[in-house]
Amino acid sequence: MRRLLLLIIAMALTIALALGVIWRTPVFLPQLTEAAPAIPVGDQRVFGYATLTNPLVRSVVAGRWLPGEAVVLPGFERVGRHLVEAPETRVPGIVFTVDPAALERIDRYERAGERYMRRLKTLADGSEAWVYRLIDGESAR
């Protein structure tokens, strides 16, 4: 019984260590390409409307705990995981603040410049945040 308990503790510690390494070293994120946007200096606000609304996903991707607050993005509608311009609609989401290192990790997660474009948009409360939109003819604006 004691050996089983020690084995369980050893396994739990191994898993915790592995998660700590993954948390700090984003080997699971693709590298950015030359098409990726420049990372601005200083803290930035990011609007999440799909997977980044989940605090656990946000934290693993960014490499640290990122609390968020509920906000609305006007002038868009959500179609699956994508945003489409629609003047009379609004998309609920979460806004959170990141440092440049966390923004780079989020760019890697979103494959910025390759799959999604990061654009600064005005939220319903008048503040601005980076929004990721699928790259195609219409959503790159």
Image: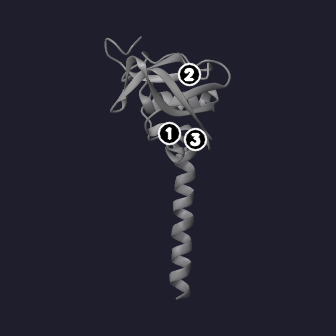
Distance in Å between CA atoms under marks 2 and 1: 16 Å
Residue 122 left/right relative to 28? right
Q: Which mark is residue 53?
A: 1
Q: Secondary structure at mark 2?
A: loop
Q: Please give the name of the residue rendered at 36% of the width and 32% of the height, measured from the top-left corner.
A: 81
The residue that mark 2 highlights is: 123
Distance in Å between CA atoms under marks 3 and 2: 25 Å
Disc nearer the start of the sequence (3/2): 3
Crowdedness near tag 2: few (<14), some (14–19) or many (≥20) residues, C-alpha within 10 Å = many
Between circles 3 and 1, the one closer to the viewer is 1
Residue type at tag 3: Gly
Question: Relative to residue 12, is residue 67 depicted above or below?
Answer: above
Residue type at tag 2: Leu
Q: Secondary structure at mark 1?
A: helix
- Image quadrant in which you'd find residue 129: top right
Q: Could you tell me residue 122's position as x and y percent?
A: 56, 17
The residue that mark 3 highlights is: 63
Residue type at tag 1: Thr
